[in-house]
Amino acid sequence: MKDKFKATALAHPNLAFIKYWGKKDEQLNLPLNGSISVNLSNLLTTTTVEFSKLLPEDQIKINGQENKKENLKVVKHLDLIRKIAGVKWRARVVSENNFPKASGLASSASGFAALTLAATAALKLKLSERKLTILARLGSGSACRSIPAGFVEWKKGEESETSYAYSIFPAHHWQLSIMALILKSEEKKISSSDGHRLAQTSPFFKTRLKNIDHRLFLLKSYLKKRDFLNFGKMVEEEALEMHAIMLTSRPSLIYWEPKTIEVIKFIQKIRTDGLPIFLTIDAGAYPFLICEKKNEVAVLKWIKKIEGIKKIIINYPSEGAKLIDNHLF
Ligand code: PMV
């Protein structure tokens, strides 16, 4: 019998078109509404997990660092996977993002997706994709959407077993360009866990929930038809609505920076001038611009005119999480 079991997985962060904001159950990360996202090709997390009989405790390094708070979450997740596999061995985990952590791009989704896949594979657990998404969700809600390929829906479900993610269309279904705009201003992060908790204090949250199933239905039909104008309009409205919930929470939650509003106005202006481009924003200050690939060059020409942008990372819809042979150690 071997005394070490190792596997490595990679996963991409995902960007939600219809957002997950507000939890029904904080322990299980059960959302109050379903959501739809796409995996981002040029952002990547690679994670190697090795379970060993010889290790006295879990050793975790994320981007070369040992962060106590983050590591606690990883150990909790490893405990869950150990319990399913019926093993007690400790693990060494090394995880690397190809994007800087301070850049404000969500790394917990790709992080927990890669960790779930690598750890379950190392322990030879043969889980269906659906089961993997449920497990990843328990680590970090939106991580479930980084497991399946391409365009993904997360069903809110009633309990843990029915709250899973699945691919609605493969990555090649639609050639979209998704540009992450990294702004020069320092991003001050309020954790999404704190934000989710506040969502229900907004007087407008009930109205959002009442309409969201219809919105999910319409968005899927626009995706299916590759109807960019209706799709983009809805994605932008949805992001502004989520931020309206944040703004009207008690206490109010403001993720935007002055530059964020400048970009929103700029995008609305060039759209009025005829360029089909829309944006979305997560729990942060940085906008993500969405256009069809055929308009990418024209869009970039305009975007470069905005001052104060540190970096533009262009992404296309991408595959889901997968196992690879190149271990990090
Ligand atoms: O998975 P969490 O807890 O980091 O929440 C993600 C929240 C948003 O990014 C704002 C929306 C979403 O659906 O990804």
Image (tube, rainbow, N blue to C red):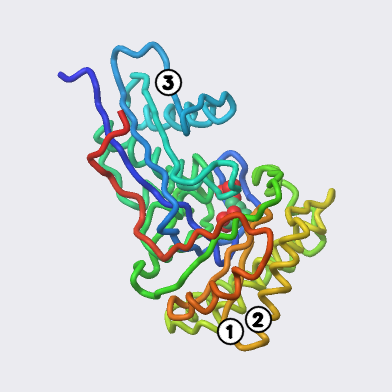
Under circle 1, the secondary element is: loop
Q: Residues within 10 Å of mark 1 (few under 14, many from 20)?
A: some
Q: Quadrant of the N terminus?
A: top left
Q: Quadrant of the C terminus?
A: top left
CB at disc 3 and ligand 1 closer than 8 Å? no
**Front one among 109 and 105:** 105
User: In the image, what residue type sits under mark 1?
Assistant: Leu
Name the residue carrying label 2.
270
Name the residue carrying label 3.
59
Q: Earlier in the sequence, mark 1 or mark 2?
A: 2
User: In the image, what residue type sits under mark 2?
Assistant: Ile
How far across and down, in percent of the image, does residue 217 sit? 53, 75
Q: Which mark is residue 275?
A: 1
In the picture, measured across the screen, residue 49 lies left or right of residue 256, that is left
In the picture, measured across the screen, residue 152 lies left or right of residue 276, that is left
Residue 21 in view, yes or no: no
The residue sitting at 42% across, 44% down in the picture is 45
**Extreme-left residue of the structure:** 1
